[in-house]
Image: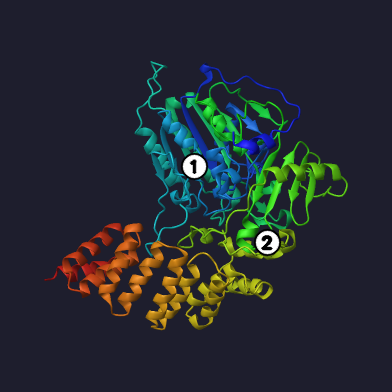
Amino acid sequence: MVGGLALALALAACGRTEPAPAASTTADHVLLITIDTLRADRVGAYGYARAATPALDSIARNGARFDRAFAAAPITQTSHATLLTGRYPQGHGARHNGMRISATVPTLAGTFKAAGFATGAFVAAFPLDKRFGLARGFDTYSDTMPTGPDGRPLNERPGRLVVDEAIAWIRNLNPPNPSNPSNPGTRMFLWIHLFEPHAPYVSGYDAEIAEADRQIARLLAALGDRRAKTLIVATADHGEAFGEHGEIGHSMFVYDTTLRVPLVIEGPGIEAGRVIADRDVGLVDVAPTLAARAGLADFDADGRDLFDAGTGRAHYAETFAPLLDFGWSPLRSLRSGRWKYIEAPRAELYDVRNDAGEGRNQLEREPKEVASLARQLTLIRGPQPEDRASADPDGRLAALGYVGRSAPSRETTRADPKDKIHVAAAIAQITSGEVRGAALERALRAVLDEDPANPQMNLRLGYVLAESNRCAAARRHFDAAIRATMPTADAHLGLAGCQAAAREFDAAIRTLESGARLEPGNPVVTANIGMMHADAGRPAQAIAPLRAALAASPDLHQARFALALALARLDRRQEAATEASELLRRLPPDAPQRPEVQRLVAALSSR
């Protein structure tokens, strides 16, 4: 266990103890399915009458359903890090999207790999990109997103593509021998992540849940003879708010709207149709459960086997999005029995057994409970995360609705997110992708009227203006974002684009070099430096940064085209032809750039 953290959370309460799984109940294979942003109350097994979730419902019917399961954070990267390490956020270090998990923390995949399992992961969105540390221990970690018309990777991909890859991976494993039960084939640990139903919604929240369920059904069918000996766990990283407590989306608050998740498990030794409704469990418990049920040695974790009820205990959760995105106060919570305490500038206490919607703050009525839970929370809260630069080099987290990190306020008293929720709600509407065109510009200006220094809104308005050929107005918004010490180079890229449009290439290069100091090795920044040199008539100086950018990110198609042109201008025709041909190979068949690249290839081959 992780020192005092696990000890502090082991708070006494009543409960019954079940025996650990016997050898005959050991699973040969383990399948972990995570559905991003799925509320428990939108699944048929949890009582939702309009649900179209037969695959998830079948897992619950064939096994166990946990009615009171909670995430440790309403944030994709943070919650998945807890799922795959069994540690609370302060134990694994990935306190927000874009933060890496600690390199010293054992991972579930590493434990399975060491035990001889084939390990595969197939994820559907950029927040789980391998650069953030979740790939450690997986033989295969598929996180490559499709490319858009401009050649840059998209931020998400459909679940059907994820499941297509996973099924192919399963079929390449040595199969079990049905006539010899002692030969399970290659033992596997497989993790599948589906981004439906995360916003922006293509067809509505419930419809996207139904699509995710269809893909789960395909995956379960592909298990074939393995299914009977496979431990299957389906859950979500967090829920979603649709106006509850004034929140739209997730990450701002730690109410159960975004912390409660579905959790259904089937597999060897698990009683069919069982419902666990009398105790709280956490996603922190999933990793040790998977390890135990697969017959592995004790997994070093804050959580414990979900089927070993033992004594009741508290469950911790946090969000640092208010601090790291807006400079407001972070929020932490601790639930123990019927009580849930939220640490904030204006603290809250809820009787969650009798007030599931958390609508009646009992802080003044229950001073003893407040004092006890606050004291326990102080013991386990851990250090505040460092103000580290975001690992979002090309704005892809922001494009999915996650606002980028701004420098936390250094004031000792920060705003309570409850007092700023109207601002956060407006921003959530913007970042959801639901607001477009002229309405988007109006919404951005409305937020900036109230919060003029907001770096993300200045950044977004800058891009809206620049993309509509209003660079003169856009510059001051990019400048404002840069002055706010945003730790990403996004504002520098926008400002440099406007400087280049005015043919101020040297100024643009200086701006990009400043951005590169914030994000060393960002291939988009490096590529733009090369393209600025090329546009300034210095092709020889463009070669090195363009090659460096492509070495880091081979599908930066605009950079490869610029490299081919720079080589051609230096009369290095064979190298130019090689790069142009490689670009043609990488471009999608319907990419609008293909005719121009084909003309370049033809010109380079004409003599």
Other residues around mark 2 within 10 Å, as few (<14) / some (14–19) / many (≥20): many
Element assignment for label 1:
loop
Q: Establish if 191 lies above or below 333.
A: above
User: For the view shown, which residue lies furthest in the left direction?
Assistant: 607
Residue at label 1? Answer: 104
Asked whether, in this view, residue 132 is left or right of residue 63, the answer is left
Q: Nearer the viewer, residue 517 or 359?
A: 517
Residue 352 visible in this rendered orientation of the protein: no
The disc labelled 1 sits on which kind of residue?
Thr
Q: Establish if 590 lies above or below 470.
A: above
Instruction: Give residue 607's position: percent from left, percent from top.
Output: 11, 71
Which mark is on residue 322? none
Residue at label 2? Answer: 328
The quarter in which the N terminus is drawn is top right
The disc labelled 2 sits on which kind of residue?
Trp
Q: Residue at x 68, y 39 (%)?
A: 315
Callout in the foreground (2, 1): 1
